Image (tube, rainbow, N blue to C red):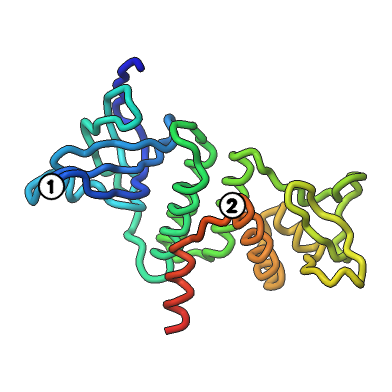
Amino acid sequence: MAKQRVDGAAAYLLHAHPFSESSLVLDVFSRSHGRLALLARGARRPRSALRGVLLSFQPLELSWFGGGEVKTLAKAEWSGGLPLLSGKCLLLGYYLNELLLKLLPREDAHAALFDAYGDALSALSRGAAEAAELRRFEKTLLRELGYGLALDREAGGGEPVRADRRYLYLVERGAVPADDDEGLPTISGKTLLDLAADDYSDPRTLVESKGLMRQLVAHYLGGQPLQSRRVFVELQEL
């Protein structure tokens, strides 16, 4: 594989784990090169300049080189601008990272998803209505992976979704009108239309859209558990 050199790429750190006594392997999400692994030599040393730069949920500029599966980090700079996440928002940030780590293929650029991730982090850092930001990010993630949602048209005939009707949302098919005797979880047409328009002002829309997105994300995860969700539930129980 031919070696490459990339300089000053906009990126975020998703995860880091130790590699030898002095180095780290980073899982990063870059705007122009997607998700990739970088070896940060010496990053664990007490006096390493990288220790104060390689921060999660912060915009970075990274340079790297190499042609293998794991590239070598050459330079890292903090781009600044975002307050540090804390409390519930920090856990939600880990949820976003976990979705990217589990669902996004390596070295597959998704500029729109990168921007949606940055927008979600920015909103969380300001204490914005995080439920709405999560739904926007999840929708963009599924669309970029090729699993875009059909929210304003019924499956099959393509009739417009009616706000006053109840629907079953079938994975990889879409919204199907629900009969009264189905006995399965349903979602209102208004929620589907609100979700299509990114309008989360209705409390019922917030609740039902969360349930729908949880169902869809779980399907595409293929049974992989989300540790961030488990930790969040445990903290709520405490």
Disc 1 is placed on an element classified as loop
Disc 2 is placed on an element classified as loop
Q: Earlier in the sequence, mark 1 or mark 2?
A: 1
Instruction: Give percent across and percent down for residue 96.
Output: 47, 54
Residue visible at 51% across and 35% down?
110
Instruction: Give percent across and percent down for residue 208.
Output: 70, 67
Residue visible at 49% across and 52% down?
99
For the N terminus, the image quarter is: top left
What residue did someone put label 2 on?
A: 222
For the C terminus, the image quarter is: bottom left
Few, some or many residues within 10 Å of mark 2 (<14, 14–19, 20+): few
Snapshot quadrant of residue 3: top left
What residue did someone put label 1 on?
A: 21
Identified by mark 2, the residue type is Gly
Identified by mark 1, the residue type is Glu
Q: How many marks?
A: 2
